[in-house]
Image (cartoon, grey):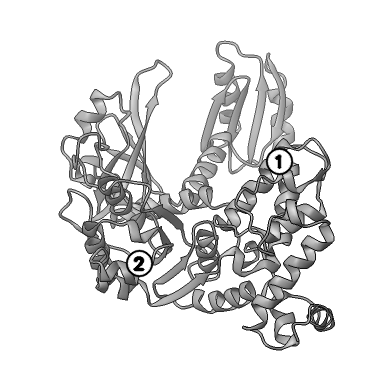
């Protein structure tokens, strides 16, 4: 039985309490004194004996209560500490001032390849193979900058936290090891927490429906994927969706814009670098996106802007899944799916000698083309309505709507910037407009096309005439590619009867 005695702290009271248990010949296996409590474990003590013992103990000056407890506080803390350490997926060591391992969790035992007893008999210097580690820890007050180490042939990022006694003297440190894959999982979760699947690709036009169907099938094929399309069409969104629909969906996803960084920075971001690789590098080195994404997907946007040197290094990785860090001599092998995207014609770049043909063959195993917004006019107004509602919420404005003239102007625009341009136009109009109804003049569409081939503000007398001219022009343009009312209706997402009526109205068929 375990009991907790609440007492007024005074000299000799703990001795008197224990003397009473000794007088009764009770074997005490554990005692914890933490005023105003003393906790005692006496296995032979039973309920009947407790009643008599309590009566005697309460007669000792200063003893207030005697209660039964389920577990001694120290044992409870040890149990919870062991459970806490066991739940940590990262290897965690606690070392004393000499670097000797005192405590290690299950992940640390697994990482070291030793038994728990062998691990506790070793030191961190032996485990890491760095005799200078202890001196560096002592010089840094047992607090080292994050650095890369190797244990049992595997790389880890080492993080240290000094342990202090109540007097302030450093008694050792807690050392946590972060594997690149674990770091990648956390970074990916932070960066992509709101990334959706195919449902995040807005639009119900036949082109988008067909694209989603093709992409869903290709997502399941574990092979390189090349996404083509103009700027602003949503290629990265499609890459996210393909990752979410793949067998790697639970693994990390990282993106690198090849056009946004110079060659040396792009190389270190993608492949990482070893300690001392260049001036300004982290002392312990740094894993690249390929290591962080091991098991997952890396999206290379604007792959056409990649330098010839990086093209060769990427080709080598695609051949066997291995690479070397910048300034490193160790081969790193990872399992990563590459999804790339470009708005440029890579075949023309190959012909001009600006892109490697063998790399194109490796990247272009699967291909998806993101259609420009002008080729799916049926999605323009639904997208505009979606962006309008979101912009109103972001700007804390009442829900606004688009006028008929504004809708006609949106449909008439060629949208060289595609969906991104449409989103910006709507957000700017919501921000600047003082009315609840957005007019065509507030959209600031300087490049809006005139479907009738004339100045709408000059020669068109009415809005109805402008809309009719646009509608007629659109139907005439599409009817040649979809020469039946049913096919044209499906293309425009409208009913067969509505399209047939309009075709007859404009004398198209």
Left or right for 78, reference 124: right
Answer left or right for 484 relative to 129.
Answer: right
Q: Residue at x 83, y 79 (%)?
A: 505
Disc number for residue 127:
none
Relative placement, left or right, of 204 versus 73 is right
368 to 392, vertically: above or below = below
- Assess disc 1: are there few (<14), some (14-19) or many (≥20) residues with their C-alpha within 10 Å of its C-alpha: few
Question: Image height check: is 468 above or below 74?
Answer: below
| Location of the C terminus (image quadrant) | bottom right
- Quarter of the picture containing the N terminus is top right
Q: Most extreme residue toward the bottom, as rendered?
A: 484
Q: Nearer the viewer, residue 426 or 13?
A: 426
Spot occupied by residue 80 in the image (x, y as percentages of width and height): 54, 43
Give the label, 2 or 1, closer to the camera: 1
Label drawn at residue 394: 1
What separation in Å lies between label 2 and label 1 (alpha carbons)?
A: 40 Å
| Residue 204 can be seen in this image | yes
**Dot 2, crowdedness within 10 Å: few (<14), some or many (≥20)?**
some
Label 1, secondary structure: give it.
helix
- Residue 53, position in %: x, y? 69, 31
Sequence-wise first label, 2 or 1: 2
Q: Residue at the spot x=40%, y=22% of the render?
A: 165
Q: Which residue is mark 2?
A: 335
x and y, in percent, of residue 442 in the image: 72, 43
Q: Closest to the observer: 84 or 424?
A: 424
Look at the numbered discs 2 and 1 and tell me whether their residues touch, using CB distance below 8 Å.
no
Quadrant of the rendered image containing residue 321: bottom left
């Amino acid at each position: 039985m375990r009991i907790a005695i609440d007492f007024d702290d005074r000299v000799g009271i703990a001795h008197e309490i224990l003397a009473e248990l000794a007088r009764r010949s009770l074997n005490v296996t554990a005692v914890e004194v933490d005023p105003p409590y003393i906790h005692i474990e006496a296995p032979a003590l039973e309920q009947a004996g407790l009643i008599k013992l309590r009566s005697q103990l309460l007669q000792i000056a200063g003893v207030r209560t005697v209660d039964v407890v389920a577990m001694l506080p120290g044992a409870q803390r040890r149990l919870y500490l062991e459970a806490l350490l066991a739940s940590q997926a990262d290897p965690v060591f606690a070392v004393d001032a000499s670097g000797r391992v005192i405590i290690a969790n299950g992940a640390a035992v697994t990482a070291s390849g030793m038994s728990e007893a062998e691990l506790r008999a070793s030191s961190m210097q032996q485990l890491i193979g760095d005799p200078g580690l202890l001196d560096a820890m002592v010089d840094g007050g047992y607090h080292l900058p994050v650095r890369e180490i190797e244990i049992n042939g595997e790389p880890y990022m080492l993080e240290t936290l000094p342990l202090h006694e109540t007097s302030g003297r450093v008694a050792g440190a807690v050392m946590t090891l972060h594997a690149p894959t674990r770091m990648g999982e956390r970074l990916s979760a932070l960066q992509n927490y709101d990334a959706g699947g195919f449902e995040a690709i807005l639009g119900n036009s036949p082109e988008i429906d067909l694209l989603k169907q093709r992409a869903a099938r290709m997502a399941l094929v574990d092979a390189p994927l090349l996404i083509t399309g103009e700027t602003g069409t949503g290629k990265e969104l499609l890459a996210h969706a393909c990752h979410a629909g793949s067998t790697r969906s639970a693994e990390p996803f990282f993106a690198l814009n090849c056009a946004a960084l110079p060659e040396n920075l792009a190389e270190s971001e993608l492949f990482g670098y070893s300690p001392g690789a260049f001036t300004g590098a982290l002392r312990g080195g740094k894993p690249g996106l390929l290591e962080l994404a091991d098991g997952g997907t890396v999206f290379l946007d604007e792959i056409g802007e990649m330098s010839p040197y990086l093209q060769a290094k990427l080709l080598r990785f695609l051949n066997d899944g291995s690479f070397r860090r910048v300034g490193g001599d160790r081969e790193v092998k990872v399992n990563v799916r590459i999804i790339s995207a470009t708005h440029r014609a890579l075949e023309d770049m190959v012909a001009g000698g600006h892109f490697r043909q063998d790399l194109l063959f490796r990247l272009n195993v699967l291909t998806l083309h993101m259609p420009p917004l002008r080729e799916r006019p049926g999605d323009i107004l639904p997208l505009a309505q979606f962006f309008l509602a979101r912009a109103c919420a972001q700007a804390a404005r009442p829900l606004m709507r688009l006028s008929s003239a504004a809708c006609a102007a949106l449909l008439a625009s060629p949208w060289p910037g595609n969906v991104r341009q449409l989103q910006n136009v709507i957000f700017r109009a919501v921000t600047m407009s003082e009315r609840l109804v957005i007019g065509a003049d507030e959209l600031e569409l300087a490049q809006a096309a005139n479907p009738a081939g004339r100045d709408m503000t000059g020669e068109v007398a009415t809005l109805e005439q402008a809309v009719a001219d646009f509608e007629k022009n659109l139907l005439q343009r599409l009817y040649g590619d979809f020469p039946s009312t049913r096919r044209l209706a499906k293309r425009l997402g409208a009913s067969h009867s509505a399209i047939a009526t309009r075709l007859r109205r404009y004398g198209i068929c």
